[in-house]
Image: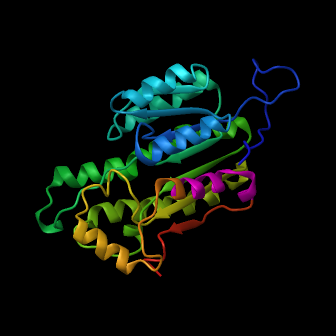
Amino acid sequence: MTAAAVEEQEPNAAPGLQPAPVAVVSGGSRGLGRVLVERLLAESWRVATFSRKENDFILATTQQYPDAFFWAPADLGDPQAMQQFGKAVGRRFGRCDLLVNNAGVLHQGLFLTTGNDRIETLIANNLTAPIQLTQACAKLMVRAGGGSIVNVSSINAIRGFRGVAVYAAAKAGLDGFSRSLARELGAFNIRVNSVIPGYFDSDMTAGVTDVNREKIQRRTPLGRLGTAQEVANSILFLASPDAKFVTGQALVIDGGITC
């Protein structure tokens, strides 16, 4: 994938050259977020991300890409922190061309015994935070002349599973947010889409027992779990010029388990 063209040139860009586009990836310190950060940097994007704590990957990437990589600590559950991070990206890079709302929190437990604090946390992390971050980044995209937003949802939003009712509700809300926002932001040349991953190897599925993993693989027409790289492929496609006429859509990447 080549970097998307941008319409305005930054003041510090060399004459006649377009500045490298800027991607914001939430939760980029590990898992799918880390894969996206690595691949975007390798394709000459400038990348901003946040996580609650700095880790070895963040330290190494900051040293390797001192001018193209920006990390700041932020708590996904704090709406003000999302707005502040978006403003920090604007101060550092002056623009935002791609936002991937990747970070999320999964908790499995019976709905009837789920406490109010847990419900509020799941909604805040999986729905409110992406909305707040999107608002901050969309303002930068309007100033830049356009952009792309990709929200990472879940098959729980389209297929019922026991023990994840609140998480599913938040992810379904994120899909609805994507469709409505695509209508609203299309006039600004901003595309908004969702990807809906099935089961793939990640921190969220690390706790799946071997027995349940085998059951999932049997129920999946392709007979296996996906990979973070495969999910990243779909996200980067939606962010690329190859998808410049795609907006308001939800791309399911699940090996066929929901078909």
**Percent position of residue 209, x then y:** 22, 64
> Does the magenta-highlighted stretch encompass residue 232?
yes
Q: Vertically, is 131 above or below 212?
A: above
Tell me which segment is drawn in magenta: 231-244
> Does the magenta-highlighted stretch encompass residue 55?
no
Position of 234 compared to 159: left or right? Answer: right
Position of 56 compared to 40: left or right? Answer: left
Q: Main secondary structure of the magenta part?
A: helix
Q: Quadrant of residue 251?
A: bottom right
Residue at figure coordinates x 29%, y 76% from the top left: 215
**Percent position of residue 89, x then y:** 55, 28
Position of 81 compared to 69: left or right? Answer: left
**Percent position of residue 250, x then y:** 55, 66
Colour scheme of the picture: rainbow
Compare residues 190 and 203 and report the one nearer the observer: 203
Q: Vertically, is 185 above or below 172?
A: above
**Percent position of residue 40, x then y:** 61, 40
Residue found farthest to the left: 113
Q: Vertically, is 191 above or below 176?
A: above
Q: Vertically, is 32 above or below 22?
A: below
Q: Quadrant of residue 59?
A: top left
Residue found farthest to the right: 16
Count of marks placed on residues: 0
Residue at figure coordinates x 37%, y 80% from the top left: 219
Residue at figure coordinates x 65%, y 56% from the top left: 237
Residue at figure coordinates x 75%, y 24% from the top left: 10
